[in-house]
Image (cartoon, rainbow, N blue to C red):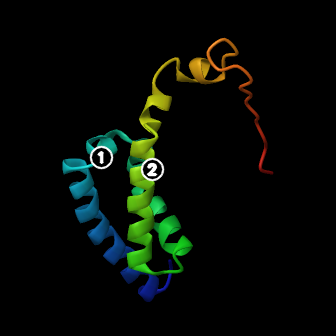
């Protein structure tokens, strides 16, 4: 994001995302302010979504909205609660559950 054009697109996305995020917080996803996906490294998140949308601000906003709705619908914040991994991956509570770890290097 070294070019002025990309910086301007990122700034526009940040401004518009602030409005969308506020609307989600006040309406369909009040817990968005507690969701680490949306609160940790916001600039990095916006950059990733803007690149995924091929620098189309409107498409990036729609992707962000869809992600927020998906995280709300699937109650992803419950997975951050203490003991959630044990419940998800314990044979007694979830027969056949397995967890895989991979190194991306």
Vertical comparison of 67 with 74: above or below: below
Left-right relation of 41 to 91:
left
In the picture of the structure, the residue carrying the numbered disc 2 is 70
Helix, strand or loop status at disc 2: helix
Q: Position of residue 25 (x, y in %)?
A: 24, 49
Helix, strand or loop status at disc 1: loop
Q: Position of residue 29 (x, y in %)?
A: 30, 46
Instruction: Please give the name of the residue rendered at 33% of the width and 68% of the height, measured from the top-left corner.
Output: 14
Left-right relation of 24 to 94:
left
Instruction: Please give the name of the residue rendered at 45% of the width and 24% of the height, measured from the top-left corner.
Output: 81
Q: Position of residue 70 (x, y in %)?
A: 45, 50
In the picture of the structure, the residue carrying the numbered disc 1 is 29
Q: CA distance from mark 2 to mark 1?
A: 10 Å
Instruction: Please give the name of the residue rendered at 34% of the width and 39% of the height, measured from the top-left corner.
Output: 34
**Residue at the outermost top position:** 92
Give the camera-side residue of 1 and 36.
Answer: 36
**Residue at the outermost front position:** 95
Instruction: Please give the name of the residue rendered at 60% of the width and 18% of the height, measured from the top-left corner.
Output: 86
Label 1, residues with CA under 10 Å away: few <14, some 14-19, many ≥20: some
Q: Position of residue 22 (x, y in %)?
A: 22, 56
Give the camera-side residue of 70 and 38.
Answer: 70
């Amino acid at each position: 994001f070294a070019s002025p054009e990309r910086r301007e697109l990122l700034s526009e996305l940040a401004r518009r995302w602030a409005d969308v995020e506020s609307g989600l917080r006040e309406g369909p996803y009040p817990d968005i302010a507690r969701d680490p996906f949306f609160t940790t490294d916001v600039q990095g998140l916006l950059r990733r979504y803007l690149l995924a949308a091929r620098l189309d601000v409107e498409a990036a906003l729609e992707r962000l909205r869809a992600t927020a709705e998906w995280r709300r619908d699937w109650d992803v914040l419950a997975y951050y609660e203490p003991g959630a991994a044990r419940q998800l991956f314990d044979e007694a509570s979830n027969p056949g559950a397995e967890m895989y770890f991979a190194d991306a290097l």
